[in-house]
């Protein structure tokens, strides 16, 4: 944070404190942590057997299950009629539906989800997930920077990098987080190149964003702008004339 070109007391305190913390080696991340398997606590390393899980070729019957949903018939009818989607007696409606499920639900195919590869219902994924949960429990334990990066994460990143013929891979918790991380990374270029000083307008990265871009991109750009690394311009949706005028 800078006020009228001068560093705030907070910035000065941080600059003074960081060297002390670094000298005490308090910034050492634990990456990766090897998690003990339940019942095999004395094992030195968790072993990954690539041949343990079956693979499949082509479309399988479970692929459709990942996009199949069932909606309560009363809700579906209100949806079709253009009525209010929230019922005042929603709990009572649910209890009535539960007593006669076969006749009270409408099966639909959902195209609004993010399960693009259909992995949520893949039996191999389900088996591996269940096995990992039984052996090592569930939950993130902490952020990847502190204590949330395990040998499982490292193995997955290495496998994905190998699959895509890349040097490395970085896991994100969601597509939203990945887009935000990318925007912030782009916005970090100018501050890094400006060697400690605030980038000038000419040194900042200019980003031109469609008005209807996803919220993850918009939020990422706003965060990058707050860090002082980008200046972004919004053009009307798919309007190349407006974009050309901004350029």
Image (cartoon, rainbow, N blue to C red):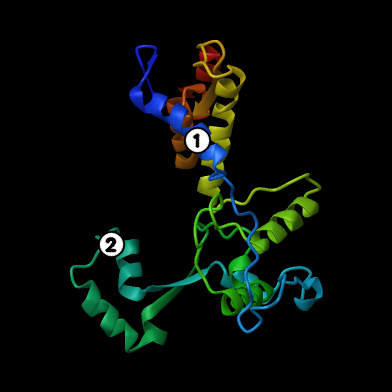
2 and 1 marks in contact (CB < 8 Å): no
**Residue 1 located left or right of residue 24:** left
Residue 211 in view of the camera: no
Position of the C terminus, as image quadrant, is top right
Q: Which residue appears at 65% of the width and 59% of the height?
A: 153
Mark 1 lies on residue: 20
The numbered mark, 2 or 1, whose residue comes first in the sequence reads 1
The percent position of residue 159, horizontal first and vertical second, equals: 75, 58
Q: Nearer the viewer, residue 97 or 193?
A: 193
Task: Check the image and name the residue furthest to the bottom.
Answer: 99
Q: Which residue appears at 59% of the width and 49% of the height?
A: 29
**Residue 90 located left or right of residue 62:** left
Position of the N terminus, as image quadrant, is top left
- What's the CA distance linking mark 2 and mark 1? 58 Å
Q: Which residue appears at 50% of the width and 62% of the height?
A: 141
Mark 2 lies on residue: 85
Q: Is residue 132 above or below residue 33?
A: below
The percent position of residue 114, horizontal first and vertical second, equals: 54, 56
Q: Is residue 146 above or below residue 193?
A: below
Q: Nearer the viewer, residue 52 or 87?
A: 52
In the rendered image, which quarter is residue 132 located in? bottom right
Residue 137 in view of the camera: yes
The mark total stands at 2
Q: Nearer the viewer, residue 20 or 242?
A: 20
The percent position of residue 61, horizontal first and vertical second, equals: 66, 76
Tag of residue 158:
none
The nearer-to-camera label among 2 and 1 is: 1
Q: Nearer the viewer, residue 105 or 202?
A: 202
Circle 1: element type? helix
């Amino acid at each position: 944070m800078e006020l009228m070109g001068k560093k705030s007391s907070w910035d000065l305190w941080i600059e003074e404190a960081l060297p002390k913390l670094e000298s005490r080696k308090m910034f050492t991340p634990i990456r990766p942590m090897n998690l003990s398997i339940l019942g095999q606590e004395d094992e030195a390393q968790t072993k990954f057997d690539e041949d343990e899980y079956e693979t499949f070729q082509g479309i399988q019957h479970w692929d459709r299950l990942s996009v199949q949903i069932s909606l309560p018939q009363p809700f579906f009818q209100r949806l079709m009629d253009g009525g209010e989607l929230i019922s005042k007696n929603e709990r009572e409606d649910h209890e009535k539906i539960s007593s006669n499920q076969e006749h009270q639900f409408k099966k639909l195919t959902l195209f609004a989800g993010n399960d693009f590869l259909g992995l949520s219902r893949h039996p191999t994924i389900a088996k591996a997930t269940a096995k990992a949960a039984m052996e090592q429990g569930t939950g993130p334990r902490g952020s990847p920077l502190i204590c949330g990066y395990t040998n499982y994460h490292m193995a997955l990143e290495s496998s994905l990098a190998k699959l895509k013929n890349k040097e490395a891979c970085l896991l994100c918790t969601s597509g939203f987080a990945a887009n935000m991380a990318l925007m912030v990374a782009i916005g970090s270029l100018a501050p890094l190149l400006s060697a400690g000083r605030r980038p000038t307008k000419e040194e900042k990265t200019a980003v031109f964003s469609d008005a209807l871009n996803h919220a993850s991109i918009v939020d990422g750009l706003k965060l990058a702008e707050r860090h002082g690394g980008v200046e972004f311009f919004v053009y009307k949706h798919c309007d190349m004339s407006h974009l050309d005028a901004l350029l």
